[in-house]
Amino acid sequence: MVIVLVAAPLFTKQILWTPITAINMKDMVSNQFKMTNASFVGTDKDNNPFKIHAASGYQKYNTPDIVFLEKPYGTIVRSTDQGKVTDNIRANRGQFNHREKVLTLFDNVRVDSSNGDKFLTEKLVVKL
């Protein structure tokens, strides 16, 4: 009797399986991993600090050195003839190549600098 109770569910059609069509295979294959509230902190080649945050980020298998960012923002400190300047940056999208330390921002890029400079652009490339 115990065997019948244990084995009976295995022979009914009430077993719930997730159909393969319900899984987004394209997303599984193309994205290595996703993260929310992504943060990158470090120093540039001149030993100036930078902080980059994003609402979310993801990597792709075929480009493991690049993190694709949604709603990135942060601060970058740079040296000028007048001293150190802090740039507050913000954009709708971005990419951070952590191997080459290159931050590329796209789509409604805004920079507000501590020296009073402000500008808007569609693309900004920062070599850290």
Image (cartoon, grey):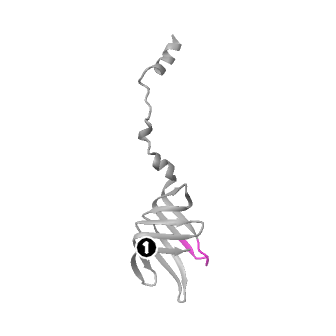
Question: Does the magenta portion include 41?
Answer: no
- Above or below, comparing residue 118 to residue 43 in the picture: below
Quarter where residue 40 is shown: bottom right
- Above or below, comparing residue 94 to residue 15 in the picture: below
Residue most toward the bottom?
81
Q: Residue 4 appears at what percent x and percent y?
A: 50, 13
Which kind of residue does numbered mark 1 sit on?
Lys
Q: Residue 83 appears at what percent x and percent y?
A: 54, 86
The foreground one among 102 and 116 is: 102
The structure residue drawn at horizontal position 49% and vertical position 55%, both measured from the top left corner, is 35
User: Mark 1 Cα within 10 Å, few/some/many (few <14, many 20+)?
Assistant: some
| Residue placed under numbered mark 1 in the picture | 123
Q: Quadrant of the C terminus?
A: bottom right
**What kind of element bears circle 1?**
strand
Segment tinted magenta in the rendering: 43-50
Q: Taken as a whole, is the magenta stretch helix, strand or loop?
A: loop
The foreground one among 116 and 30 is: 30
Q: Residue 104 appears at what percent x and percent y?
A: 49, 70
